[in-house]
Amino acid sequence: MFKNFNIWFVISIIISSFVLIPILTVFSSFFDDTSEYYELLKNTFLIEYIFNSSVLLFSVLVLTFLIGTGSAYLVSFYEFPLSNFFKWALILSFAVPPYIYAYSLTAFFENYGTAYAILKNLFGDGNYNQSIPKFDGMFGAILSITFSLYAYVYILARASFLYQSQNLIDLGKNLGFSKFKSFYKIILPSARPAIVAGLSLVAMETLAEFGAVDFFSINTLTTGIYNSWIAFDDLAFANRLSFFLLLFIFALFILENLSRKNAKYHFNTREGLKQKEKLKLYGTKSYLAFMFCFIIFFLSFLFPLSQMLYWTIKFPENFFDIKIFELLMNTIYLVTISSFILISFSLISNYGNRVSKNKILNTLSTLSISGYAIPGVILAIAFITFIAWFDESVIKSFGILSIKKIFIGSILGLVIVYFVRFYSLAFNGIKSGYEKINISVDESSYLLGYSKRKTFMNIHIPFLRNSLLFIVILISLEIIRELPITLILRPFNFETFATTAYISASEDLLEAAAVPSLFLILIAAFFIIISSKYILRDNEK
Amino acid sequence: MKNKNFFEIKNVDFYAGGNPKVKNVSFSIENEGDIICLLGPSGIGKTTILRTIAGLEKINDGSISLNGNLISSKEINVEPEDRNISLAFQDNSLFPHYSVEKNILLGAERNKGKKDKKLNLKEIVDLLDIFNILNKYPHQISAGEAQRASLARSLITQPDLLLLDEPLSNVDQSFKEEIQVRLKKILNKLKITTIIVTHDSYEAFYLGTKCGIILDQQLKQFDDPYKVYHFPNSVEVVNFLNRGILIPAKVTGKNTLENWDLGTIEGNFIKEYPKGANVQLLLQPEDLEHDDKSNLKLEVVDRKFRGTNFIYTLKTPSNTLIPVFVHSHHIHQHEVDEKFGIKRPIHIDHIVCF
């Protein structure tokens, strides 16, 4: 069973087991409790939570599919004005988290909001408030999440379209298919695994979404968990809800995993990597394609950006009220420590898996990367539950002072939960880098006299350098946008751009939320632009 | 106690991923610098043998020793990096982020200053004709070039034992023979003991001091290439090397036997059989000679043009199909259904029977 027992194996087992703790905590706390809680829940909130989560999920999936696949198809197969610009501009929407989109939406359409101001400037005074549509409640949440997340589908669908074999496209032409028939008979089915993978990510993020749904006061499973913990101080209640959400998410996770296995299949053929010739569009078709992409780009990025910019300029006093430099330093601090720990441990764990080829470790690793599928709210609460239990049952029994303060409301605790949440990002990123290194490369290295450590340092690290850089950027992007974990676990008086924006917005001071939101968008956009080549996979050979 | 053989495999069962591949293998290399070729069909376990010798797979039975030192047994497994054995993989195992030159130079670091006979980069580059690809990266070169680069990296390490897995399988046919000649020359010059795995029997017979034939999970024959070719020790080896056909015959004397269709056949038996024994005689295409004047005439059922020769397939009265080799410059050519004369008396230098 432990045939290839070595130091790499031991460390990898420890890392994977550690990451699994919060997940196991949620499951175990569900089975431990024997109160009549479930009945109470079933009769009161549970149905509403599940109904709202399902409506949100279904609507966002349909919209992200249409927007993501449609725009990916246009920029992959056709040439029209600014098509090369849209190729990467469409991923800028990642810089706008759903909660900031929600603030923008409200700010623009609310009574006497930006839309009202524009109309007033154009047409003079009038009773415009009644005719301006209101995008709040469930509809607002759906729009906010859709425009923030459609890029997952866009990126994966585009990558799949881009590397689709030219032969396949030619085959469609040869069979006399129209463009539309080629699209739904050939192109779409062969990109299906990638699209499903993208939709699964959207689904997980939607179910985990906290900021936007909380802002619009929609009761979903995620907000239910947070509120039961914050409002009722009921950890068991929160854990029970988490259990339901986890079941939901694990079903999606399995679906995503299965689909990814298939996706790999058509990515690796050399023939498939042949760049296709794009068809040039003229006249109305060209105009329509341009308008489609422009509207999406405008709504997903320019609109929230300009709204936040407008408010920052309109209410300059807010600019000086918040300590931008301190927020920036706090963000850099969190990003640096978390990236370093995530990258180091994921590298070791990946290498441990590679050299020990152990089934137990492999299963543990697969389970441990499920942290990304678990909403930040659940992770944070599960972490607190675990520390509380550990403190009560283990630490205190040894007569040692409480360790709660070391982990809860501290940078250490925050970084640990970030680690669990984003471990899969780092682990999978490095894993896909490793998949490009044939195992015979390792063996050649051993046969050239290099030890395992030297192979790791001299052969693998240089090879993975670019992947590592890209992963650091992704982690940074996630941490900058992250809200619930930071909100729950941050030390007293320690704020990030995300928490500052959230606190202002929850106090109905949307104007004050504009400055941190604007900075958040700009920093995130900067990271996206410098890594767009990697995100779009244009550099893959 | 140190072993007198330079390299020895003793009663080893070879496993790949837990599945048995080749069982109870024993052979040895007496002298440093010898080249051993292992021949066998695809998937039989030849690569597994090389990987095990290199230390990449472990063994549960028997032992493997190099230079008198035990390197593999149930209890001992010297790590691959500590064996000074180099393996050139069949597939591309070059480090993808280094240029071909850097890849080769990484190999040179291993025995820096340890070996008496130096092999420098230039020599190896000339030998394998890879000058043009030195600055390229592995993904920019062809499979054949990658294979030569990988071979260069293994050679430059000047290991105690060099293992080559189908080293020229991706190299163009036109270039292959030239490389074979150069490879043999350099291996002999540097006295690098080598085990080559191949499915190309001509490559094995040319390069090998000894050849091993692996069939049905066994090392069927291990001998000089000449003996393997002319004195195959089993029907399986005959079939694998596609050496000819087996026809029934009766031993009639010390140097003769009798076949119902061909009559008396004389020659030297490589193994003694009692008079009157019924045997299966190995009849190879070059054993029979064409003679239009002969009264032993057989019907032509097929004729294959093979460049320097024709292979006629003849049918005997008892419906046995016999291959006969004829030089392609031979004037009289026979069409299908025509009669083909066989020179009598039939004389076969080495009579191989089973």
Image (tube, coloured by chain):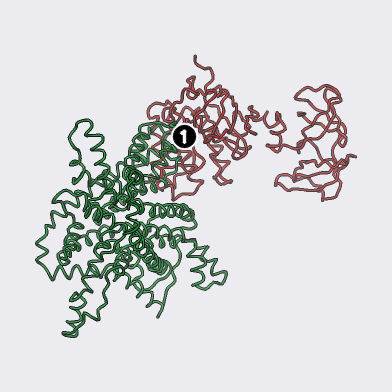
Chain colours: A green, B red
Q: Position of residue A516 (x, y in %)?
A: 17, 61
Badge count = 1
x and y, in percent, of residue B244 in the image = 74, 37
In the figure, residue A207 lies in which quadrant? bottom left
Q: Chain of mark 1?
A: B
Q: What residue sits right under mark 1 in the picture?
A: B155
Q: Is residue A294 left or right of residue B33?
A: left
Position of the C terminus of chain B by quadrant: top right
Q: Which percent across, then down, holds residue A133? A: 27, 77
Q: Label 1: state its secondary structure.
A: helix
Residue located farthest toward the right when viewing the structure as drawn:
B295
Quadrant of the image occupied by residue A367: top left
Q: Position of residue B347 (x, y in %)?
A: 81, 31
Vertical placement of A218 versus A363: above or below? below
User: Residue, x 24% and y 68% (percent of image)?
Assistant: A304
Rendered residue at 74%/48% (across/down)? B304
Q: Nearer the viewer, residue B201 or B1?
A: B1
| Quadrant in the rendering for residue A90 | bottom left
